[in-house]
Amino acid sequence: MNTIQTNRLQQILAGALIVQILLAVWAFWPRQTATAASGPLLTNVTAADVSKLVISDVDRTLTLAKEDGEWVLPEAGNYPVTAENVTSLLENIEKVQTNRLVTQTDSSHKRLQVAPDDFNRRLEITTSAGETQTLYVGSSSGASATHVRLDGQPEVYLTGDLNAFEINPQAGSWIDTLYFTVPQTATTKITLENESGRFEFSRAGDGQPWTFSDLADGETLSENAVTSLLSQLSSLRMVEPLGQTEEASYGLADPLATVILESESQTYTLQVGAKDEESGNYSFKASSSPYYVQVAQFTGDNLVNKTRADFLEQLPAEGSSDQEETPLVIPLEPGTTE
């Protein structure tokens, strides 16, 4: 083989090698950096268009709906929702773009938690025109990098506008949880009744000492215990609303605890109903509200389990003393030293 033929063969081999390298680069080029024409993932949808939003995780589903221009919880007697919370989420959904393509393969959906049967959050977004689109919000691969996919499309994108952990399918994340409030200074009488008995406390006015109607000789009322009880009752927060219709399961026909708060001009009745075995929360109803709600276990326990002894100053145990004992000193005999 002459020199010309050898050079020609080397050129052919070098060209083939370059083609192979280019093919390898194309095949293994990371798709995370792939870009597409930028545009909204949800087309023809704006925050103002949305009339219903259903948020789900693997265990729970929460429905938010717009009734007469106001956001409410339709499954809880149209309990009012904090509109700013919903609007903020919808505006973030509207911002999601298609310029950060991650994958177009169906087999990746479960791994990225955007599959119909394996997802972090599923958002069913319905417009006032009756059109519904479903958006899956999946895992995050870092800051500003949450995987999202529109149902019916194989493409998965990255976005910094949504985070699954900030989209909570629990009512408490979307409402004002303050359920009952009353000025502490105005309350002049507290009556608590539970399985342990009936306890009545009264005072002449704000700043005056509390009295206990059932105080026996030698007993002293614990002012701190009454003040603590009033502090809890004067600002009660709920876990979630249940609705405006009483259900037998709430257990309020025979409440576990009843509290009556009285002032010179108002009387309020608070009732603690059945305890939910799964969550530990209690059904609850205040006479000032048309809504039945659930309150936290701590709140319910503190009313249901109160006993008479909880409102009394505890005497020192027999044989004990609050004062430090003086050590016994034995005098030394004259002429001796320690």
Image: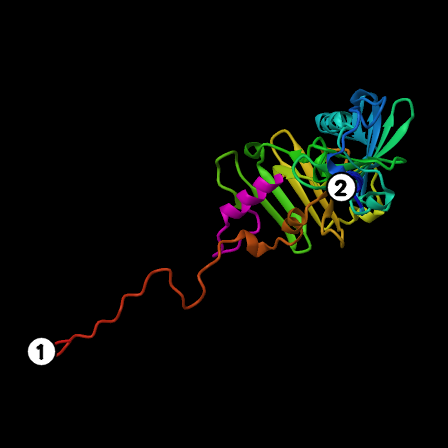
Q: Amino acid at mark 2?
A: Thr
Does the magenta portion include 13? no
| Circles 2 and 1 in contact, beta carbons < 8 Å | no
Q: Which mark is residue 153?
A: none
In depth, the one of 267 and 34 nearer the eye is 34
Count the marks. 2
Which image quadrant for residue 267? top right
- Give how far apart the Cα atoms at labels 2 and 1 are: 127 Å
Check residue 231 for magenta coloring.
Answer: yes
Identify the secondary structure beneath mark 2.
helix
Image: 266 above or below 316: above
Query: Can I make out residue 172 in this image?
Result: yes
Tell me if 43 is positioned left or right of 180 in this view.
right
The magenta segment is 212-233
Q: Which mark is residue 334?
A: 1
Residue in the foreground of this view, choosing between 291 and 70:
70
Instruction: Please identify the residue farthest to the right as the structure is shown.
Output: 130
